[in-house]
Image (cartoon, rainbow, N blue to C red):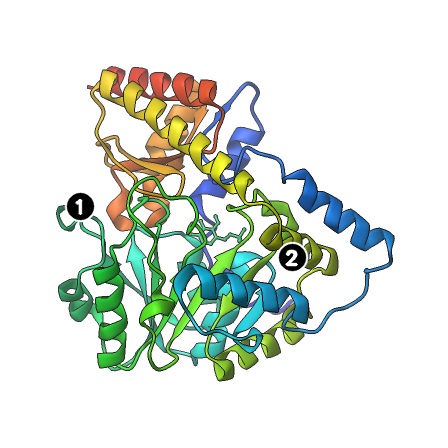
Amino acid sequence: MRELSKLVTGLRRSGIREIGDLAASMQDVIHLEIGEPLFSTPPHIIEAASEAARVGFTKYTPNAGLMSVRKVIAQRLNEDYHLKLTPENIVVTVGGIGAISSAVRALIDLGDEVLIPDPGWPNYEMTVKCAGAVPRRYQLDQLKGFVPSIEDLEKVVTPKTKVLIINSPSNPLGTVFPEAVMRDLVAFARRHDLYIISDEVYEKIIFEGTHASALSFDTDGRVVAVFSFSKTYAMTGWRIGYAVAAEPVAKEIAKLQEVYVSSAASVSQKAAEAAITGPQDCVEAMRKAYHENLKIACQVLDDLGINYHMPQGAFYMWIEVNCEDSMEFAKALLMEQKVAVAPGVTFGPSGKRHVRISLASPQEAIREGLSRLGLMLSKRV
Ligand code: PLP
């Protein structure tokens, strides 16, 4: 039998899934590894989708999504970020993942280089490789506040670089880039004639500072911004997000939807419309709950004397465990203490001494899970 695609068989799955799969085969595990809201989707959103299904709204939609949904998305972005978008700039996608993977494919050719953060969400590397492009890491340095530095980017950009991927609020660090950093990043991209894919799926989960969208600084259509309903409205399973781009780029992203998925699910699009046009207090309630969880986690870690980076947004904590191999550490923590965490190394080589926990977990799981992490660390010194 001939071999399967090397591009695909050569992909490494994320270490978060690896730990998750191991944990699923065990009993009584405390789960802090997965980045998924602990809330159910708000009832008015579920009701809108049910009603859509009941009245027969169960057919294909246009590749770029329903015009009514693209309209309300453009409106809300214009209000939030003072933009002048039209529905033609919006493509409704299968989650933020659908927007990122289609944007990468729409922008690169085989062998082009794409700059991705270290540490950064594992999916960037997989998506870039799967599209036949070459990922190059740029450093997010603790001494520079874990925001991208132009100096570091200049070190890794080459004539082959086509795209820069940025992520604020960031997973796993929780950094919220100041407006000036966003402006400089877009200017850097302009100088080197790069596109930017700006992953802003955690835009509404902010504890400190304000979210600046890369779209606000885009003067010549080189930014593709990615948003999602997954985290903002606790809708991970509905698989619905969107890409925002200049019209020619948006058209190619929509064309890719025709190839791979046709469109996002019709009922999920109706749910998304209700999410945007309905009351927003659910978003604030969830943000507050994650903030409370952050305070609890800080208290436990401070009491244990464990170092961590204070997140300004998203719902993760980047914790120093000072081991040589965070994958080995995460496996040992799971086996010995029954606590599942994401190994830092899965986010890039700089994460070999860190683990990431999700604050979107029940408070008791955070308290008990971190106490057991402390126990494990005390046994190792
Ligand atoms: N971007 C980041 C940084 C994420 O952490 C995630 C999910 O964990 C996504 C994008 C994609 O989420 P979804 O496809 O559910 O919208």
Where does the image place residue 44, in percent across and percent down from the top left? Answer: 69, 43
Viewer-closest of 339 and 84: 84
Instruction: Tell me what residue is drawn at x 73 percent, y 61 percent.
Output: 266
The residues bearing labels 2 and 1 have C-alpha atoms spaced at a distance of 39 Å
Q: In this view, does 149 lie above or below 106?
A: above
Residue count near mark 1 (Cα–Cα under 10 Å), binned few <14, some 14–19, many ≥20: few
* Position of the C terminus by quadrant: top left
Viewer-closest of 121 and 129: 121
Q: In which quarter of the image is residue 273?
A: bottom right
Q: What element carries label 1?
A: helix
Viewer-closest of 261 and 83: 83
Left or right of 310? Residue 59 is right
**Type of amino acid under label 1:** Gln
Q: Mark 2 points at which residue?
A: 273
Query: For disc 2, does the CB lie below 8 Å from ligand 1?
Result: no
**Type of amino acid under label 2:** Glu
Q: What element carries label 2?
A: helix
Please indicate, yes or no, whether residue 91 appears anywhere in the rendered image.
Answer: yes
Q: Earlier in the sequence, mark 2 or mark 1?
A: 1
Q: Name the residue under label 1.
A: 142
Instruction: Tell me what residue is drawn at x 39 percent, y 51 percent.
Output: 121
For the residues labelled 2 and 1, say whether their Cβ atoms are less than 8 Å apart: no
Residue count near mark 2 (Cα–Cα under 10 Å), binned few <14, some 14–19, many ≥20: many
